[in-house]
Every structure is written in structure tokens, then in C-alpha cells.
Amino acid sequence: MKKILVIGSGALKIGEAGEFDYSGTQALKAIKEEGIETILVNPNIATVQTSEGIADKIYFLPIYPKFIKKVIEKEKPSGLLLSFGGQTALNCGVKLFEKGVLKKHVLKVLGTPIESIIASEDRDIFRDKLNTMNIKTARGIVVHSLEEAFSASEEIGFPIIIRTSYALGGLSSGFAHDKKELATLIDIALSHSSQILIEESLKGWKEIEYEVMCDRYGNCITVCNLENFDPIGIHTGDSIVVAPSQTLPNSEYQKLRTFSLSIARAFGIIGECNVQFALSPNSEDYRLIEINARLSRSSALASKATGYPIAFIAAKLALGYGLHELKNYVTQTTSAFFEPSLDYVVCKFPRWDLKKFSRSSTQIDSSMKSVGEVMSIGGSFEEAFQKGLRMLDIGLEGFINPKKKR
Amino acid sequence: MSISSSMVRNIRKTLKIFPHVRRIDTLSAEYPAYTNYLYMSYHAYRHDIDYEGDGRSVVVLGSGVYRIGSSVEFDWCCVNTLKVLHSEGYRSIMINCNPETVSTDFDECERLYFEELTLERVLDILELETPKGTIVSMGGQISNNLAFPLHQNKQRILGSLATSVDEVEDRYKFSKALDILGIEQPMWKEFSKMNDIQTFIREVGYPILIRPSYVLSGSGMNVIFNVEELRYFFDKLETSEHSVVISKFIENAKEIELDAVAHKGDLIYHAVSEHIEFAGLHSGDATLVYPPQNIYLSTFQEIERISKQIAQYFHISGPFNIQFISKNNRIQVIECNLRASRSFPFISKVSGFNMIRLATEVMLGKLTNPCGIFFSFNYIGVKVSYFSFSRLPGTDPVLGVDMVSTGEVGCLGNNFYECLIKAMLSAGFSVPVKHLLISGEISSLKEDFINTIKLLVYKGYKLFSTEEIYPFLMDYGLTSKLLSWPGVHHFPNVFDYLRKKKIYFIINIPHNKYSEIDNNYTLRRSAVDFNIPLLTNTSLAKAFIRAFCKEELTIAEWKSYLTV
Amino acid sequence: MNDPIARLILQKDDKEYIGHLFGAPVSSSGEVVFNTSMTGYTESLTDPSYKGQLLVYTYPIIGNYGIPNIGKNISDFSESENIHINGLIISDYSHHPYHWNMRYSLSYWLKKNGVPGIYGIDTRALTKKIREEGTMLGKIIINHDIPFYDPNQENLASKVCINEKTIYGHGKYKVLLVDLGVKNNILRCLLNRNCQIIRVPWSSDFSKEDDYDGILLSNGPGNPKTYHKVIKHVEYALKDNRPIFGICLGNQLIGLAAGVNTFKLKYGHRGYNQPVLLEGTSKAYITSQNHGYVLDVQILPPNWKILFQNINDGSCEGLIHENKPFFSVQFHPEASGGPIDTEFLFDWFIECMHSSNKLYR
């Protein structure tokens, strides 16, 4: 491997922000250390990764297949890294693969194979694969009429969520607890769209994430787990997140951890992936929600929360190293194949700026609205929580009773 | 009883209640690990690290939480500052609390405190570190706001004087200073009551611009066109301890930015860039061109002269930024900040001259000579904002004095149009394949806009229009297909065309904010929801249309431009 | 903070650490050891290997999910019926626990079992002290002072193992389980794999037993060299060809019987994140560990090889015999708490019994 092309994430947007500058910068450092030439395409001129001395060559160009193709033709790299530029880079890479550009230029996607990425993003393949592994996913059925909706509800059982893809492209959803409520909702939904998705409701379930690292030998670790303060239904990006999980006893923690590792192996992850679960608050019942076969917002958070440089190590794994062959970057003496132990608590808080927008709703739900986040570290949950609120710079001194104030 | 936080702090210290510094070592202290990744806790008995107390460290305050108006650009400034500190032989100490940043990568500095950027915590750290000084001008507003309180607590701030920072940030004091210097500025006055405002408005006339002091990214800022809007504004206004400043809003003025570094009051480097859009659009949302393409030499000289005056008056040492408006050769100052601005990374990368390096060297007291200015005829850079409206259901994708973009991109090109098209594509726009829709307000569509439309027709694009625009285009001999509004059950209907993706690009020039017509809002929102590129500013629309009607794009890497 | 004051005193320190009491209001002493795991206090507190120890958690918040119902049933969420530690030392006690299967609060359960806990201690500072100066004796003082107690001077297995032979299950493979303080999950792992367990007290002469397919030497507390009797019995068993599997203390005893020495680590491995490498491969596993002693494998007796190695400090994590079905591991493949990534070792053991069965009959 002589020359590697890295694709960045472009402009900062809601859902894809500074975390990809951090992970991309680390990846570039990790590759450079190996004496390999790096080419970066990223039009985000304000980032650290597009600075002097990080990549050998930088192209400030759109993350579109057309442009990346031209860079490939010009630079003739032998390896391609897609997992450090968020969904933007991944989508672009998948298009290049589908168009045969990668094959034509004998360009190898490093890390998780592109077929695995596609499989993890395709709802049907994803569900089938997990079914064969006996891992539970949320059940959902697409219906076109009230009759179909009734039979679907019988199969899934109440309560259920009705999701419609309606006129303005946004998603509308509603909960139904019985047939009567279902009939009302379906009536409204059918006026907007002919296709309605009926899904089992996981309302109130805990949302737990695991950050998994995997090497080409199949060695896997979980760097950390994260527990959302807000339950399923609120986007992780808009939720307060706590690391490590606070309400899971060993049996639940290990069960979800073991699933995460087997999923990562089954999808052939080489590098990092993020696995999200819904966990019942009243039993050990769970559902796998999704996996991200790339670096994510959570991985940046997990890196900072644990001190484990996920992106740096993921880049080394993509180059072919085994986890056990790498050193713990922090201690320099112990191995990178280990699971960080925390002797503190970490909280992540989102920050919204919705007041700036005309006609915006301040309701949070399953689509992310926050524009930034802070992470606080404390010796107790209270300490971390209070710090986090102050860090948001919204005039809060902490979680205090306003009536008692002064 | 009211008790100030500084009193509580003093009592706490007398009682010997101190937070202690802990290391993050990934192993819960199971093995010895000498990491530089730190946080503070009241649960700890003692510090995990020893302090040198040799005054060879410099503390850099980071940008804290990302928000609209303060984002990755300040992270870039901080990281570069840390690099310079390191190469100049200082221990670089970073304080920041944002997990999305590179500055909170413990690899980037000698010591990282993942901590609050509050006065209380920053003082805790500074009292332990006893650094040579603290740099507050790289992290945007949150760190800059700490300059004066830290100074009051006897902490040494590197760079411009904390008192100068305070004077510039306080709009009242700053405007007064401009008066003393004889520098023109839009007429302004400070108010707290609605009654006094009426008198001022009678004097200057609408529109006016209202803004509280100490704001970044224009929060709480508004352009007001009439008395109803004024009442509406005051109803929404939140009480703040800083004053509200009202100034005359100048329409159709050009906005120019200056990013500069001064050394003890002497301007040693500066860069002038221009907005494509007229003033009134927040500079963080505007399209920035550098080096500027449409500025007279006299304007340049005037800006240089004013900047030198300001640098001298406030005895600036370090980075600063001034925003100007220019109309009919009159240059006025609208804002100034004694800190690195959002455009520092863009300017530095386009020119290949790292302004943060220079600014940091200045703040460290390194002797620095004037560096001249960068100018190139061979290539230029354009910065375009990115908007996340699609993520926020129902929001109106219009731009105003309040910043709403969440990110930005910047591209280099051999000429303005090539560069603009690359940047706009990077920001998610696409070149329309065939049909464009023009709608909205007529009054802002002037002669030169019609010429641009003619170019489109010449290039074979087909036009759609809505009811007000249709006859307007007809008057200029331009035929378009009239589409009726979504609410009207007439065919052909705008909504139908959007849904069927028969429209590839939309230009919708909005009316004034509070008298919004719902049809236009629905159209704009649908454009976002159906993922159809939308432009709401005539200047940018004109430039973009001209750009995509022009030539091929070149594929070249950063350094190949700089070495031309 | 209305809880009464409790004091922590260490043998190698003239300082007193002041905290607050939870659990039973009695003074208690023992050997101070730390654990770096972030969940699983129920499992650790009921793990017989912790007999006589004052357990320090490096993770600051303990007690969040309370304690589930703990009875005599081995299928419950515990490793034995009782608490084996002498005291619990933590930073922050969760006074408002909640979990769907919670039966008691941690404090109530400790109180019920007569074990004190102290919170409000900087457990990181304490851990660093233990790390630098080695494990030390300590005591939690509530009202009156008591002397230090060194559990390593005693034979601890007799305090934690069963009194008489007990049979579990009706499976195909008969496992002779030598109970040195066995964790319930070892029993569960065997029962889930079609085994019948013949559980015998550590001191019994299992060389007298004959009706079994394989021996499992369990985990247990204390210094392995104090188990002379067992070592003798193992020496005898090694002459036979039936499979032997050792876990933790069992690993050390097999080593000692084969002629390998043991020594005490400066700071033992106690946590859920210990990396081991399967010798001669690129297969690495995260394991759960809880031990202070380790095999000294600088010189190995003939026919014995290293099976696993600790990736962090290179210490021996297991042995395997070159031509007989004997193997042992220093970590806990049964986990509980901790990762279950090495549970496959029980399958190895079954496989060994399966094939040697065929050889025999």
C-alpha cells in the first residue's frame, strides 16, 4: 500500500459535525505514521484535517462520485478509506463501487468490505442476517389498507407505531394502543400515502449503544457502552448520553456486549462499528435497532469518554494490523486489545439553537435537531451532570431548583 | 441575601475545599500511566499530576459547545495555536469540553483539561498551572468573554488587553470610540424602552437594526421595517444584562470583512474579503470571496486606513476582525472583534499564510515584522454556507441577520465562477438539468437579474413561474410556464411539479419576515423536503446561474494553487 | 449524607480515611484488593474467591441496580448463596436503586449478611496506593477498633466449599468438580452442556473416585501453595489419562502439581478487561479475572506448554499438556461477571471427555 485516498464529510451539518474532523485527522495521522502517502478530499476548508501537515495532498472538492472519480484518475491511489467521513463519504463510496469505478482503477476499500457496508445499510438484508443469528429486531409490516393494518396489528401486538411517509417528505408517526386508535390513525395516514409501516412500539425502552472494534483476525472488543438518558424515540444526538451504562446489571451488560461482538464478526467489520439496542425496562427483552459500519458521533464520544483513540486504531486495523499487535495509545505499555475501564462517569449533553429558525418546532423526536454537544467528566453522576449543564453555555448553573435561587 | 459567586469562591478556598486533578488512563489506575488527559473532581483527595510552576506553559481556552456561529473553525484556530506554542518551546495547555473537536484530542497538546469553560473552573486550573499567560482569542465568543473577568482576577491574558476586549465588545463603548476616531458607522443609539426608540426612528427612518451587546452569530439581532415588526420584536425580547443597540440599517450595501493581526497596535498582516450578498444577511451565512473581485482600490485603502486606526486605538496585539459596509464609496464599520474570526481558517488556507501562527507568535511576544498582504490574480477562494433545513421539519429556509447555517465549505478555483460552482456543489447544490422555477417578490428582481435569466433561456433552460413573476417576465419578453399555488386546485400546480421532480432548481425571493405569504413559505419548505436546490438571494442566484452556464472545472490539489 | 461516619485504616498508612457507612454497622478487617469492573458487584460479592477481602471498586457508583433475589438455586443471578467479602469500599453509593428484578438495596443486603460498606472514599487514590505498595491489610472501623486480619494465613477453601459430595444434573458427561470455592456459573456452564456434576469438597481424596469422565478444578481464594493436599491429589490424577480442566486457583494447582512454581503479582488482575492471546495464534480474547498469584513459567516441565498469555504483562494465563487432555486457564471462562468470550473452553473440555470416552470404551 503506497497511496491512500481518504474521503471527508464535507460541510458540518446537523447529524454530521466536528466528530468527523476528529476521526479523519486521527486516521490520517495513523496512516502517515506508516510512511504511506495520503490524499484527502474534503471541501470543508475550516477543518483541522485540511491543514498543513496532516494529509500529503488535499483537494477542496465536492464529495460527489464525479469529482472523486477525477481525483482517483489523477492520483491513482491503491487504497480507499470511506469510514472516516460519515454517511456522506460512505454513500459516495458505495456509488463509486456500484458504478464500477473502484474495480476499474483496482482501488481497494480498506477496513470493512464495501459489501458489508451495503448489507448493514439495507433493511432487508440486515433483518434476514440477524434472524439467522437469532438476534431480535423490531418487527414491522408494510400495509396498504385498514384490513391489512388490523391483521398486522394482530401479528405484532399492541401498542404499535404507525409511520407514514407523507406529502412533504417528513415522517409522521403515531401510537395506537387498540384497534379503535389504529383505525383512526390509519384513516388519516391513508389520505397522505398509500404505504404505511406498522411497527411494534418500543416506547419507553432503554437505548443502549456499544462501540465495537474488530480486526481482520476476528478479534473483537467493545471500547465502551453508552446509555441514553432519554428512552427510545428520542434521537441519540438529541439525548443526554451517559457512559458507562448506569442501570444495567452484569447479565444485561454482557448479553448485549456479546451480541455486539457477534454482529460485528458476522458483518465482517474491520475497524469500528456502532451497535444500538433497545432494552426493555421490565425484563431482559431487547431489540437490535441498527448498526453503523463506520465511525460515528458516538465513536468520537466514546474515544473521549474512555481515552481509547478509536479512529486512530481503526485506521491501523484497516491497514491490516491485529488489535493485539497494537499498543494502548494512552499507556504506551499495555495492549490496544483491551476494554477500557472507567473510574469516573461521563455525560454528553446536546445543544439546540432552534430559536434562530423561523417556524421551527422545539419538540424533540426521532430525527436529530441539535447542533452541538458537550461532554462532562465527574467522580459521581451528579458532578458530571451539573458540569455538563454549565458547559452548554445557556445560562444554567446546574440542575437547581429555580425557586430556591436567591 | 444575595451572595456573589466570587464570594462563594473565596469562602470555599478559605475552607480548603478544592477540586483535584485526575488523569484519564483507560485502566482505572490499574497500571501506571502518565497521560496528559485530565479532568477535575471534588471527589478526589489529591492531584494525579505534579505542577512545574516554572511559567513555561500557556493555557489556551477552547470554543466549548458547537452552536450556530461557533464551530469547527475555532477548533482549527485552537489546534494551530497549540502547535505554535509547542514549536516555540512552551507547554501547551488546552481547556475545552467539546468531544467533537480535534483540540480535545490529548495528542494535540501537552496537557488537556476536559473541563468547563466557566470562570470558576478556568481559575481553578490557572491557579494550579500558574502559566505564562492565557490565550482567550482563539475559541470564539465563549473564551473571549472570559478575558475581562480573568483579568479582574489577576490572571495574565496574552494578546490584546482585556480592557480593550471589553471596550470593543460593548457596543456602546465601541461606537463611542469610533466617533472619537472619526470613523463612520451606521447611526446608532442605546435603548431599553420602546418610547425612546420611536423618536430615534423618526430621525433615521426605517429599516433599523436591533441588537443586544455581546452577541455572536447575531442571536437576538433583527432588521425591522415597520412599527408592527418593532412591537413584535419587543414582545419576544428576553431581558439581558447588556444593553440593546439600535442602528440605521443600510439597504443594498456591500459587506466587506477584514481579518487581521496587529502587534502592539501596529497592523502587521491583513486580509480583505467580500460578500456576494448585500449586507443584511449574517456574515456567517454569506458567501465569501477572497481575494475580493469587486472592490475599488480606494475602498481597499480606506479599509486599511480605518483598520490601522482601530488597531492603534485599542492597542491590539493578536488576531482581530472588522466588518465593513460600503455603499456609494462610503465605508462604515459595523462590527469589530478582538479575536480570531470564523473566516481565519478560510483566509489562511486560500493564501497559504497561516494567520494563527503569526497571531500566536505576536501574543508570545516574539518580534514580528509587517508581513505584507496576499494577492493573487491566478486563483481565488470562495466560501459557501451549508444549511441543515432538511433536518428541521417545518422551518422556513430563509436567511436574515440571525445566522442559521450549520457549516461551510471553501473551494479554490482559477476564476470566480469556477470556484463558486465547486463550492456550491460542495454545499449540496446541484446544477439544474432543465427546468427552473422563479417565484417570490418582484421588487428585488432588477434589470441585471433579467439578463441572467436571459442567459438561462439562451442555454436552453425552461422557466416556470408563479403568478406575480409570470407577467413580470413577460414584460421583458421572457416566456415561462405559469404554475398555480399549492392551495389552488388548478392545473398545472407548483406542488404537483415539485412532487414529480419536474423542477430542478428554485429561486424564491422572500418578502419581509413578518408579513410572510404562506404560499411562498410552503414552496420553500417543499423545496427543502423534496431536496430541490433553493436560492433565496438574488445576488447569489445571479452568480450561481452565471457560474453553471460557464466553463469546465479543474481538479487540482491545494498546494498546486499556492505554488503558481 | 445522613449516614454515620465510618473510618478506613490501612496497615501501611498512618492516615485515616473518613467516609460514610452503608450495610452492616460492624467493624471489619481483611486484605484490601481492588476491582476495575464497571458492573457485576452482585457476582463479585458472592464470588468465593474474594473470601476475607475488603473489596475496593475503582468504578465510583455502586448499587444502582440493587440486588436481585438470591437463594439456594444455582440458576439465580449470583455466584453463591452468601457474601464472601469482608467489606466493601466505594466512592459513591447509590441510595435510590432501581431495576425490574431488584429485591433489595445493596445496603440492605450487606446489612442482612453482616458486612459493612464505606462510601465517600477516593477509591482512585486508594487503588494507586495499592498498586504502588502492593496489596495490604486494612479495616473498616465503625465504632470500636479491631485488629488487622490476614486471610492468606488461613486455608480459605474450607470456609467456602461444600461439606459433602453433591450430585447435580443427569447429563451424559460425568464431571468430578473439585470445589475450592466454585462459582455457580461454572456449574451452570457444565449443566448447560449435558453434564452430570459430582461436586466434592476440596479436601476429599478425589483420587478415590472412579466413576467420572473428567475433572474440573475450580477457582478459589488464597495462596495456592497452602493447598498441599489437593496438589498431591492432582499429581495422582495427572498420571491418569482422563481430561482435567483447571480454572484460576485450579490452574495454579495443576501447575504446582506438574512442577511449576507460583508467585504473587505486585498487583493482581482483578477486572473484566484482561486481554489474553491464544499462544501461537492471532486469536485474542477479553477475559474476566480475579487473582493475585500466577504461575512462574520461565522453565516449564517436559510436555507442558503455555496455552494463553496475558497481552499486557506477558504473564502466564494457562497451560496445556502436549499429549494428554489436560489444560487450565488463569482467567474465568465462566465469567459472571465479565465477558463470556472464552466460554468455548467448556466446549473444549466436553470435547476432550467425548473423545477420551471413545478411546476408553
Image (tube, coloured by chain):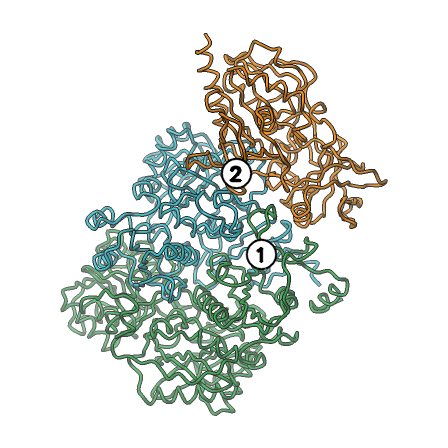
Chain colours: A cyan, B green, C orange
Q: Position of residue B192 (x, y in %)?
A: 58, 77
Where is residue B270 drawn, in percent x and y?
Answer: 40, 81
Q: Is residue A334 visible?
A: yes
Residue B451, compared with residue A363, is above or below; it is: below
B454 vs A193, nearest the viewer: B454
Which residue: 69% across, 36% down? C106
**Relative to A108, A130 lies left or right:** right
Q: Quadrant of residue B371?
A: bottom left
Real-space Cα distance between discs 1 and 2?
38 Å
Instruction: Read off the chain for label 2.
Output: C
Q: Residue at x 70, y 17 (%)?
A: C163
Label 1 sits on a secondary structure element that is helix
Q: Which numbered circle lies on residue C353?
A: none
Which amino acid is tagged 1? Gly
Which residue type carries mark 2? Asn
**Label 2, on which residue?**
C310
Is residue A159 shown above or below C214? below
Quarter placement of the C terminus of chain B:
bottom left
Side (left or right) of C96 relative to B257: right
Q: Is residue B539 visible?
A: no
Residue count near mark 1 (Cα–Cα under 10 Å), binned few <14, some 14–19, many ≥20: many
* Residue at the extreme right: C144
